[in-house]
Amino acid sequence: MTALRLEGRARVLGDDINTDYIITSRRKRESLDPQVLRQYLFEELDPAFAASLAPSDLIVAGKNFGCGSAMEVAVTALLGAGIRAVVGCSFSRSYYRNAINNGLLPVACETRGISEGDRIIITNGTDDAQQIVVTNVRTGEVIPASTLPRIMLEILDAGGLVPYFRQHGDFRT
């Protein structure tokens, strides 16, 4: 796993952000192109949200992010907008796996101390690449996140599950 360092502006959402809030299912009937879908991100919560996103932004949520249906497009649309990670207290199981499989980093940690617009930095540990930490630049708080199994880090490092298989042919033991 290469060294991880993502830095960006926190875009804070609440608890129970379901996949239809991320990208409404009617939009996937119109297009599956991430560059088209990105303009509709979170439109059910705030119609102006997508236009305010910058490619380096990091989504910060409460508990149960990505609940609801297992729409893979809810990950694809975020990636299309240049979002590389979602920091949340917890994730639905299917969203978490879809994120890993498509190269979006899900970071599970306490998020209550992160406010809209805070600069946050996501890094992995120097001694243990599996340990992820989130630093809030405004407050100086360093928030430990749940560790990720090495295979998940390798899948993320490859850019997702399909690129991982292209590189390795199978899971390494």
Image (spheres, grey):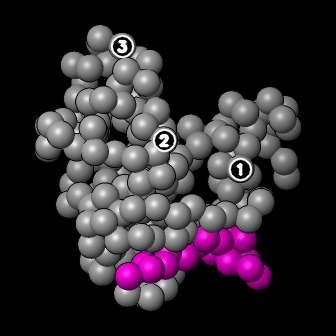
Does 57 appear above or below 75? below
Q: Please state the extent of the stretch shown in magenta in the rendering.
A: 123-138
Q: CA distance from mark 3 to mark 2?
A: 18 Å
Q: Amino acid at mark 1?
A: Asp
Residue beneath the point at 52% across and 64% down? 7
| SS of the residue under disc 2 | loop
Does 109 appear above or below 158? below
**Which x, y percent locates residue 98?**
49, 40
Q: Which mark is residue 31?
A: 3
Which label's residue is closer to the chain start, 3 or 2? 3
Residue designated by label 1? 157
8 or 126, nearer to the observer: 8
Which label's residue is closer to the chain start, 3 or 1? 3
**Which x, y percent locates residue 32?**
41, 17
Residue designated by label 2? 82
**Which x, y percent locates residue 121?**
52, 70
Residue beneath the point at 38% across and 82% down? 138
Q: CA distance from mark 3 to mark 1?
A: 28 Å
129 within the magenta span = yes
Question: Is the residue under label 1 in contact with that under label 3 (CB below 8 Å)?
Answer: no
In the image, taking residue 22 as reference, residue 110 lies left or right, namely right
Residue beneath the point at 27% across and 77% down? 112
Which of discs 3 and 2 lies nearer the camera? The answer is 2
116 or 146, nearer to the observer: 116
Residue beneath the point at 54% across and 68% down? 122
Write down the quadrant of residue 73 in the picture.
top left
Answer few, some or many: residues within 10 Å of disc 1's Cα (few below 14, many 20 plus, some between 14 and 19).
some
Image quadrant holding the N terminus, namely bottom right
| SS of the residue under disc 1 | helix
Which label's residue is closer to the chain start, 2 or 1? 2
